[in-house]
Image: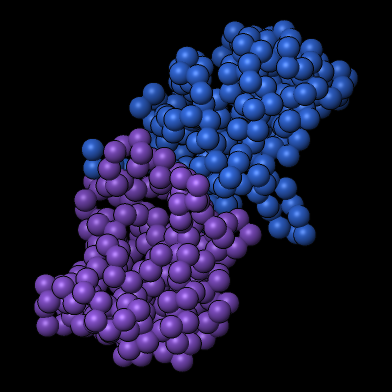
Chain colours: A purple, B blue
């Protein structure tokens, strides 16, 4: 598959690297075509890795991964271009976190989510919220956390969720550990897990943890 | 121990009933001294069970459990009286949920929590947020959910958290499954789990589930 991974931060580089390793073609998208971090990533990642603007990356891709920060996601996706997202699966992995007055704050929250904002802004994209509840190293190597543990996803399009579930399988997530929370409004629940994640990270002193679900039936 | 359980809803009655069963004395508190639901509960629960106003219940108790709805918690606790809460462990199990325009909404959220509101309003109470992340039947019978699974707690007072951890042990929660999220601001993370809980409840069709934590170390 041809993937665009938008965002050259640790999340984007990690997801892009894993996708290349799995045999996919990946264009790491950023604001400019000559982003030095992206160029270095592509050089290290090998011949199936390329770089480009958000628009160039998205236009050539079959699947787009939004891995920019949640507070700039809409701007980056507008740069990518609605016409380059239309009809495509758009995996949104971001959280709308930012430091404000020295605290990590989540916004939008409760009555909205970035996942929903993206789906509203790009109604022809097939948005699936996924992976935002774990650290990026765990995203692509779930075995870093011992035992069974769960990922959530949500979105409007069952086929898009199925494609993402298959991709998660390539990353090492068994199908049975992928919990479908329903429509894209489930992104609120997923993004609102961040305050717990941050508290646990502070308590454990590392990011190699995840949630598992236990149920009576 | 002598407990006041404030609130005659399912959560209050379930917690009160379990506490009586464990040998504690419990006064179920409500707005009026002759609440028929409370009187019926006390009759069924046996001789260690009593009823009273919020103030009467709190004044006679060593430990107070806030089991009224999160949106009315401060009002109920003001009725209970700051002087009847001072110095006491106050276990806050509520979530600030209410239906608004046909949707379950959480408020306060993100920048505040009911747990913090209670601690600010009653600075001499030793507030511990706990148990709000599971259904009340699971609160007092964790074995309803198979396997190991976790509860969170938070608060300012280490001794109060230790007392609550011991009480959770009486309910059947092993000490190792009780995760201390730190100070009372952790209540934000705990209350913000509700949207996920609601989605899972809708998906599973029942409330007998819980989260487990997996960690590398």
Pick whichever, B168 or B182, lies toward us. B182
Picture residue at 51% right of the left edge, 42% below the top: B189
Q: Measured from the top left, where is residue B180 in percent x and y?
A: 42, 29
Count how many numbered circles sit on residues in the image: 0
Q: Quadrant of residue A94?
A: bottom left
Q: In which quarter of the image is residue B176?
A: top left
Pick whichever, B116 or B168, lies toward us. B116
Picture residue at 39% right of the left edge, 72% below the top: A66
**Residue B174 visible in the picture:** yes
**Residue A164 visible in the picture:** no
Pick whichever, A46 or A181, lies toward us. A46
Q: Measured from the top left, where is residue A184 in percent x and y?
A: 54, 69
Q: In this view, does A49 lie to the left or right of A138?
A: left
Q: Measured from the top left, where is residue A197 in percent x and y?
A: 41, 46
Picture residue at 27% right of the left edge, 43% below the top: A206
Q: A118 above or below B106?
A: below
Picture residue at 35% right of the left edge, 54% below the top: A134
């Amino acid at each position: 598959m041809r993937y665009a991974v938008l965002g050259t931060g640790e999340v984007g580089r990690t997801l892009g690297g894993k996708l290349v390793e799995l045999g996919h073609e990946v264009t790491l998208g950023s604001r400019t075509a000559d982003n030095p971090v992206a160029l270095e990533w592509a050089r290290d990642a090998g011949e199936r890795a390329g770089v480009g603007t958000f628009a160039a990356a998205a236009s050539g891709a079959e699947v787009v991964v939004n891995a920019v920060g949640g507070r700039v996601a809409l701007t980056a996706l507008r740069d990518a271009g609605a016409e380059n997202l239309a009809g495509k699966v758009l995996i949104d992995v971001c959280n709308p976190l930012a430091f404000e007055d020295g605290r990590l704050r989540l916004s939008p929250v409760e009555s909205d989510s970035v996942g929903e904002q993206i789906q509203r802004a790009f109604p022809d994209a097939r948005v699936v919220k996924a992976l935002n509840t774990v650290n990026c190293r765990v995203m692509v190597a779930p075995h870093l956390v011992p035992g069974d543990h769960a990922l959530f996803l949500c979105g409007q399009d069952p086929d898009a969720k199925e494609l993402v579930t298959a991709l998660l399988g390539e990353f090492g997530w068994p199908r049975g550990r992928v919990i479908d929370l329903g429509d894209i409004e489930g992104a609120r629940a997923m993004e609102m897990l961040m305050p717990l994640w941050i508290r646990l990270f502070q308590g454990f002193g590392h990011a190699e943890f995840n949630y598992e679900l236990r149920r009576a039936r």
